[in-house]
Image (cartoon, rainbow, N blue to C red):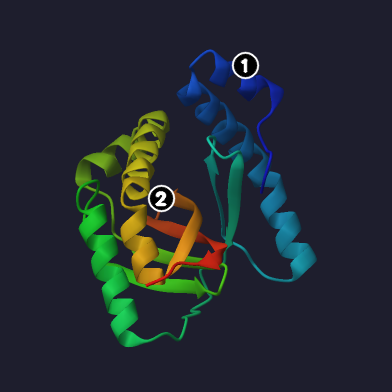
Amino acid sequence: MRNFITPAEEVLIKQDKLELAINFRSSIINAVTEEYLPEVSKILGIPFDSFFHDWNYDRNTGILLLDNSQSDHRENMDYSFKSNLFSLIENVGSSYYKKPASLKVVKFTQNICAIESKEVLLPLERLVYEKGNVELLLHQAWEIKKGYWRNKGQFEGLFNRLIEDMFIMWDYKNNRNHLVFIFNKLYTMK
């Protein structure tokens, strides 16, 4: 999604209240999701269990992810490449959160790569979620995403693609996240 920032969010951002804008958007999207998810499932004939979202306020882009937990879709990719990708995710991520118990590429095309990580929360993070302090977790998620952006060049080298955008969607209830790379239409030169 592009050009998603609302006038209310623009005001908050101009007043240097980005965290408040993020919390505002998350509250609205989460409320709308409760009605949206069953309707989309009905229209598409696919039972979606979860709905995730992430936003890049600097680029004015966002992503929505509908999840069907019954789907066991796996992308067929070169073992060596997948192993290098997972190692890089673990190395970069280890500075910011717990090493995942498992990683799975759920989508890989010329435009996108989406990886699901399971069992990524520390006991303290689970407790924070259970106590309902989602705002603190949103702040942490923002910091983690910034860490991935700082390592963007490593991922571009591995993919041999320029990364246009990057999103991380968290499923605190089920202790997992989805890391999504959106590729530019240009390739890098190795």
At 60% from the left and 44% from the top, the residue drawn is 61
Res. 12 image quadrant: top right
Mark 2 vs mark 1, foreground winner is 1
Q: In the image shown, does 167 or 186 lie closer to the viewer? A: 186
Residue positioned most to the front: 189
Q: CA distance from mark 2 to mark 1?
A: 32 Å
Q: Residue beneath label 1, please?
A: 11
Q: Report the label total.
A: 2
**Neighbour tally class for label 2: few under 14, some 14-19, many 20 plus, Cα within 10 Å:** few
Q: Amino acid at mark 2?
A: Lys
- 6 relative to 89, above or below: above
Q: Secondary structure at mark 1?
A: helix
> Label 2, on which residue?
173
x and y, in percent, of residue 189 in the image: 42, 70
Report whether residue 132 is seen: no
Closer to us: 161 or 134: 161
The amino acid type, in three-letter code, at marker 1 is Val
* Residue 116 in the image, given as x and y percentages of width and height: 40, 65
Q: Secondary structure at mark 2?
A: loop
- In the image, is 114 to the left or to the right of 97? right
Circle number at residue 21: none
Q: Position of residue 44 (x, y in %)?
A: 75, 68
Q: Quadrant of residue 34?
A: top right
Q: Is residue 103 left or right of residue 19?
A: left
Q: Image point 68% across, 70% down: which residue?
A: 46
Task: List x then y, in percent, for residue 55.
Answer: 54, 42
> Residue at 47% of width from left, 58% of height from top?
163
With 181 as the anchor, is 67 left or right in this view?
A: right
Crowding at dot 1, Cα within 10 Å, few <14 / some 14-19 / many 20+, comes out as few
Q: Is residue 97 above or below residue 163?
A: above
